Image (cartoon, rainbow, N blue to C red):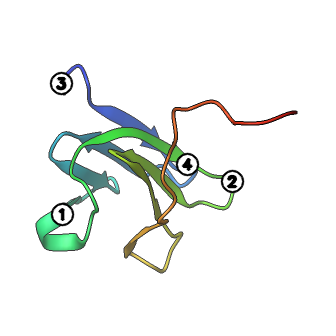
Amino acid sequence: MFPDDVVAVTPDSVLWLGTRGGVSRFDGLTWTSYTTTADGLVHDTISVVEVAPDGAVWFGIEGGLMRKAPVPAETLLPTNTPVSTEPPQGGG
């Protein structure tokens, strides 16, 4: 692993590894890799990997988020929700 690789483990012990070259999944027997060119990732640089309570795996990518739906789906879907680093405007 490299210093900026990120890791998350799902409740069913699947390991997700995010790198500057995409995402890899290890189920205990087999590694599967996902990239922009082959699998539809919006960006290959993964900065965060988190597992939601519903089993979905979320990836922080340059300019936004991506979500991998829980089983049986294996498709990586962009959320089309940009991430802002700016503070909210107005009152509150």
Image point (48%, 49%), residue name: 13
- Crowd tier of the residue under label 4, counting other residues whose Cα lies within 10 Å: few below 14, some 14–19, many 20 or above: some
Mark-to-mark CA distance, 2 and 1:
26 Å
Place of residue 38 in the rendered image (x, y in percent of width and height, measured from the top left): 13, 71
Residue 82 on image: x %, y %: 48, 53
For label 3, the residue is: 2
- The amino acid marked with disc number 4 is Val
Q: Helix or strand or loop: what does disc 3 sit on?
A: loop
Number of residues whose C-alpha sits closer than 10 Å to that of mark 1, classed few (under 14), some (14–19) or many (20 or more): some
- In space, the residues marked 4 and 3 are separated at their CA atoms by 21 Å
Crowding at label 3, few (<14), some or many (≥20) Cα neighbours within 10 Å?
Answer: few
48 w.r.t. 33: above or below: above
Give the labeled residue for mark 4: 51
Q: Is mark 3 in CB contact (under 8 Å) with mark 1?
A: no
Q: Earlier in the sequence, mark 2 or mark 1?
A: 1
State which mark lies toward you, 2 or 1: 1
For disc 1, the marked residue is 36
| Mark-to-mark CA distance, 2 and 4 | 7 Å
Taking the view exactly as shown, the residue that stands out farthest to the top is: 3
**Place of residue 16 in the rendered image (x, y in percent of width and height, measured from the top left):** 36, 47
Q: Quick one: SS at disc 1?
A: helix
Q: Is residue 69 above or below residue 64?
A: below
Residue found 53% across the figure and 69% down from its top: 70
Pick whichever, 37 or 54, lies toward us. Answer: 37
Mark before the other along the chain sequence, 3 or 2: 3
Q: Determine the image quadrant of residue 31.
A: bottom left
Query: Do labels 1 and 4 touch, CB within 8 Å?
Result: no
Q: Using the image, tell me which numbered label, if any, was put on residue 53.
A: 2
Which mark is first along the chain, 4 or 1? 1
Asked if residue 1 lies left or right of residue 17, the reply is: left
